[in-house]
Image (cartoon, rainbow, N blue to C red):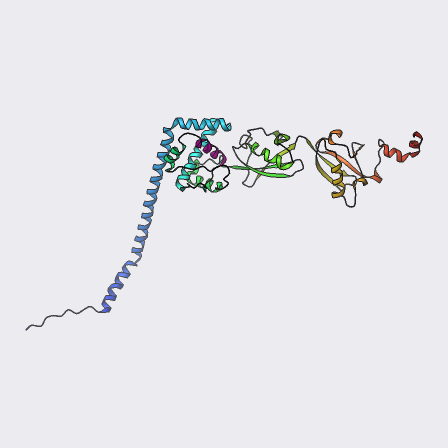
Amino acid sequence: MAKSKRTKAPTVGTRKSKRTKVDNVTSSPDVKRTTEESTKLTKAARRISDESIQQQQDREEAQWWKLHVDKVSTLIHKCMNAYNWDKDTAKRVLSSYRQFLVVKREEEDWSVEPKLKPCWSVDRMWEEHVDMDDYSFDTETLCGHVVHRPNSAYEGGDEDLTREKVQQRFGEDFDWELWTNVKLSFRDQLGDSKLYEVNALQPISCHFYSYAISKEPGDDEDDYRFVYEEKDIQEGDTPSSLGMTIISSDSEIVVSTIHKYMVKFAILHSNGDAYVDYLTGKETPLLDSFELFATEHLKDVSRKDLIFSFNGRRLYTFDTAATLNLSDNDVIDATPVKEYHSEGCICCQKKQNPLAFATER
């Protein structure tokens, strides 16, 4: 009987050597390079796909605006009438408004408290669009979702973030001026300043009232002149229309504020130790200013220790800027009583010749 051949089972060592060969193959530089290239190609394909989708969406968005000429015309004219924009400006704002809606769509910013916040001019057009018929239908068609506009009380949203995203998305087509805010320093006659911020197309007068009521109780914006480069700022004037140039993001443009019913004057001590500016109502007695000068700016001196005079005339506590016909930047002199002398002053004459006054009586 013939013996059957027995196949020898592979040893553990043999199995290990085969596995090692496979490991060596998968970890070789060529395989790694191929894997990396494959990953890059996959990412590139996805990017091309995303870009294709984006381009298609952009074409559809542009086509929608072209097909709705009447609606576009209505929106432009509403803004022209509401904000005194010319047609070219309104068209520029429309372009930025469209860009803003595109970014809203891509960021899926649908919350009632959105993270994106448009610049002032774009927000004004947005508000006008909301008031038109079919706004919800328009935004649902353009963005795939109804775009909620928060009311004026909502102070959230990040305008800087929005500006950055719109600029990144549209590059050279981004309108820097429309998205630029200007810092204005409202500076009064004494040099005190309050800082405000307005959009390049926003009327500067929007801050006149808040400034006025912050200065004096009962004041109104009509009590002030707001001056830029020696010209009064008119209702509707904007940084853009006045040619305000922004040197840097931190730069401030000075607007001089002049109270129509107050006068800025200075009190100068005779020895030159003090020179102080004051702002007072034209009909307000100068007594308070005299008291402040003596007690706050001179040491160990009361008002009664000083004689105040203007153009050689001695002043009294009942005198006002109106009675003296004071103009801005006029100077009142303050002299110690012991040093004061004026030929036209009755008190000085009485000191010099008391007998003459006694004889008259």
* Magenta part, dominant SS: helix
Q: Answer left or right for 207 relative to 174.
A: right
**In this view, which residue lies farthest toward the bottom?**
1
Foreground residue, 284 or 332?
284
Residue 265 position, x and y percent, is 72, 35
Foreground residue, 344 or 218?
218
Foreground residue, 18 or 201?
201
Q: Quadrant of the N terminus?
A: bottom left
User: Which quadrant of the figure has residue 56?
Assistant: top left
Report the residue at 37% width, 29% height from top: 66
**In this view, which residue lies farthest toward the left?**
1
Task: Say if the magenta span includes residue 126.
Answer: yes
Q: Answer left or right for 3 relative to 211.
A: left
Q: Answer left or right for 166 relative to 237.
A: left
Q: Answer left or right for 352 relative to 255.
A: right
Instruction: Say whether residue 203 is visible.
Output: yes
Q: Quadrant of the C terminus?
A: top right
Residue 102 position, x and y percent, is 40, 37
Report the residue at 50% width, 35% height from top: 120
Foreground residue, 5 or 354?
354
User: Which quadrant of the figure has residue 213?
Assistant: top right
Count of marks, rendered view: 0
Magenta span:
119-130
Instruction: Say whether residue 85 is visible.
Output: no
Residue 327 position, x and y percent, is 71, 30
Task: Say if the magenta span includes residue 95.
Answer: no
Residue 219 position, x and y percent, is 64, 33
User: Which quadrant of the figure has residue 203?
Assistant: top right
